Each structure stands twice: as C-alpha cells, then as structure tokens.
Image (cartoon, rainbow, N blue to C red):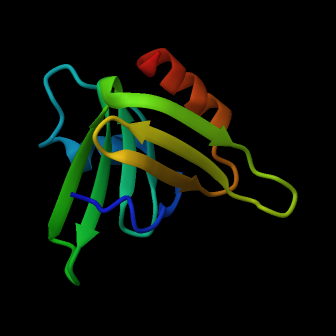
C-alpha cells in the first residue's frame, strides 16, 4: 500500500481517461467507469464511479505496480485549496476512516473545484 503518511502524493496533472482505462483495465470492477484521471511522472490517481485508485509505479523498470483502492464510502471529510498568485499548485485533502489524511497536490490548470463537486456527489 502507498504510504500516504510520509509525504504528499506526487504533483499531478490531467491524464487522458482512455490511457487510464488501458492502464487500469485489470483492476476495474464490473461497470466501474473512470470519471477523472491525473498523472505525475510515473504515479497516478484516478477517480472512478466507485473509488479512488492510487497507482504507485515501483522499481527501475516500472513493472512492479501498487494499486491502492480508496472507496468513497470511507471518506469522512475533504478539503480543496485553489491555486494562488504565488503558490501555483492546488491541493485536495481527504480524511479516510482507518487510514487518516491523504493529500493530493495538483499542477496549475487542474479544475480543483470540479474535483470537489465530484467528491460531493460521490461522498456526501
């Protein structure tokens, strides 16, 4: 499992949902659809119709991969922080039952408010 307690997850930018579909086809449940996807250098976070999937690519070759499933029903609270004039990144904090706080940092240009609306629809 990804260790979310030691540091925030990689800075993420938009990722083509079709590429995310190809990458995650083996772990998606029946009828589960990708809603939004974000990718860092090697790692990614994908919001589906049932959960958040954090993909941690490990090792030099990248063949070892860790998929962490974060179900929406375990989200106790969430917070979004928009980018500012000097701080160009936006942030999403999620508090999960049994896991604690997970922070996701996004590059400039990510619609963090839209992500907050998605979470409101699936978590509240």
Task: State left or right for residue 64 relative to residue 49.
Answer: left
How far across and down, in percent of the image, does residue 46 sit? 37, 42
- Residue 14 appears in the picture as rendered: no
Count of number-bearing discs? 0
| Picture residue at 82% right of the left edge, 53% below the top | 84
| Picture residue at 43% right of the left edge, 28% below the top | 76
Front residue of 43/101: it is 101
- Please, is residue 16 above or below residue 51 in the view? below
How far across and down, in percent of the image, does residue 53 sit? 30, 43
| Picture residue at 18% right of the left edge, 63% below the top | 65
| Picture residue at 15% right of the left edge, 41% below the top | 27
How far across and down, in percent of the image, does residue 32 sit? 24, 24
Residue 33 image-quadrant placement: top left
Q: State which quarter of the image contains the N terminus.
A: bottom left
- Residue 66 appears in the picture as rendered: yes
Front residue of 91/26: it is 91
- Please, is residue 76 above or below residue 66 in the view? above
How far across and down, in percent of the image, does residue 10 sit? 47, 64
- Please, is residue 57 above or below residue 113 in the view? below
Outermost bottom residue: 60
Front residue of 81/64: it is 81
Task: State left or right for residue 59 relative to residue 81.
Answer: left
């Amino acid at each position: 499992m990804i260790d979310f307690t030691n540091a925030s997850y990689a800075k993420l930018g938009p990722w083509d949902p079709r590429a995310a579909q190809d990458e995650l086809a083996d772990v998606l449940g029946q009828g589960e659809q990708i809603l939004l996807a974000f990718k860092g250098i090697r790692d990614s976070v994908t919001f589906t119709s049932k959960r958040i999937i954090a993909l941690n690519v490990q090792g030099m070759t990248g063949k070892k991969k860790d998929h962490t499933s974060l179900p929406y029903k375990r989200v106790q609270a969430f917070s979004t922080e928009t980018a500012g004039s000097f701080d160009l990144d936006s942030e999403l904090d999620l508090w999960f039952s049994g896991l604690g706080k997970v922070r996701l940092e996004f590059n400039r240009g990510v619609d963090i408010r839209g992500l907050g609306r998605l979470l409101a629809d699936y978590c509240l």
